[in-house]
Image (tube, rainbow, N blue to C red):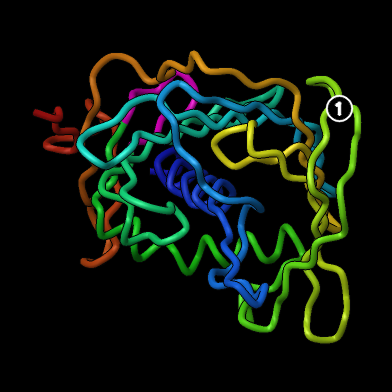
Amino acid sequence: MRKVTMLILIALVVIAIPLGATANSEGKVSEIPRLFGLFSPKVGAWAEYDIAEKGSSGPSIMRMSIVGKEGDAYWYEVVNESSSSKNIMKMLVKGNPNDSDNIMRLIIKSGEGPAREMPRDFVVMGRKMATHMFSRRSGVPAEGADAITVETVGEKTLEVPAGKYTGVEKRMVDKDGKVLATYVANDDIMPFGIVISQTETTTMTLRAHGSDAKSMITGEVFKMDLPPGMPEGMPRGMPPGMGPGMGEKKK
């Protein structure tokens, strides 16, 4: 039970990270910002980042990839890896993944454990918790997104582990004039176009990118069930073999 609960929490954290923010013609943010930049999917595109977060046990690596397409929906995969863990989230999205209504399917895998598909209603219900967790980690408020503006600073050339890049530097400013985040965007880096982004607590720096992405989730995928004692309306899952009826192979 504890292992599965941790897997759920990991999934919520991952959901909070790789989601995009958009801005209207007045520069107002139309969605609460998660990952800065615009979601531009292309099958095979991938980008990998060094993540440095204050208060964490050490640096980590995040890889975002577009690993397939079904009709007009894309399989978008996020891998978070540190010295002690590796977690994968793969979701079928139809539109910007910032809107949980656009997530058609969600599969997660933690370490060497089997891949599990979350019930879609859990994805929707988990959105508020993920938003809160992102706000606490990043310093960007979870509420009042309509009062945050995106300002263009100008063209900037910088060198990161992936190489030398020129992009447009932007910053997110709240209603009191406080700069919440800065980032440099380059449209050639898919799927979000980010070279580097910085908040008070987290820095994300491009380490590599390419166009030959393949899914890191292979093998069988199992459905998630309700463990004993879990209240209705809060679907969670148990891995196969951890109790009678607790693991059902995905058909």
Instruction: Report which residue position mark 1 lands on.
Output: 160
- Please identify the quadrant where the C terminus is shown: top left
Point out the stretch of residues depicted in magenta: 107-115
Is any atom of residue 56 visible in this view?
no
Instruction: Name the residue furthest left.
Output: 251
Count of numbered circles on the image: 1
Query: In the figure, is residue 2 to the left or right of 134?
Result: left
Residue for point 61% across, 82% down = 146
Left or right of 40 on screen, residue 186: right
Q: Nearer the viewer, residue 18 or 196?
A: 196
Indicate left or right for 115 with 47 as reference: left
| Residue occupying image coordinates x 28% and y 41% | 73
In this orientation, does residue 111 appear?
Answer: yes
Q: Quadrant of residue 160?
A: top right
Where is residue 37? Give x, y as percent.
63, 51
**Residue 124: horizontal and vertical position, in percent?**
34, 63
Residue in the picture at 83% in, 35% down: 166
x and y percent of residue 4 in the render?
A: 40, 41
| Amino acid at pointer 1 | Val
Q: Is residue 109 magenta?
A: yes
Q: Is residue 74 magenta?
A: no
Where residue 111 sits: x, y (%)?
A: 49, 23
Q: Is residue 67 above or below residue 198?
A: above
Seen from the viewer's position, the closer of residues 245 and 112 is 112
The residue sitting at 79% across, 41% down in the picture is 167
Element type at mark 1: strand
Q: Nearer the viewer, residue 231 or 66?
A: 66
Badge 1: residue crowd in 10 Å (few <14, some 14–19, many ≥20): some
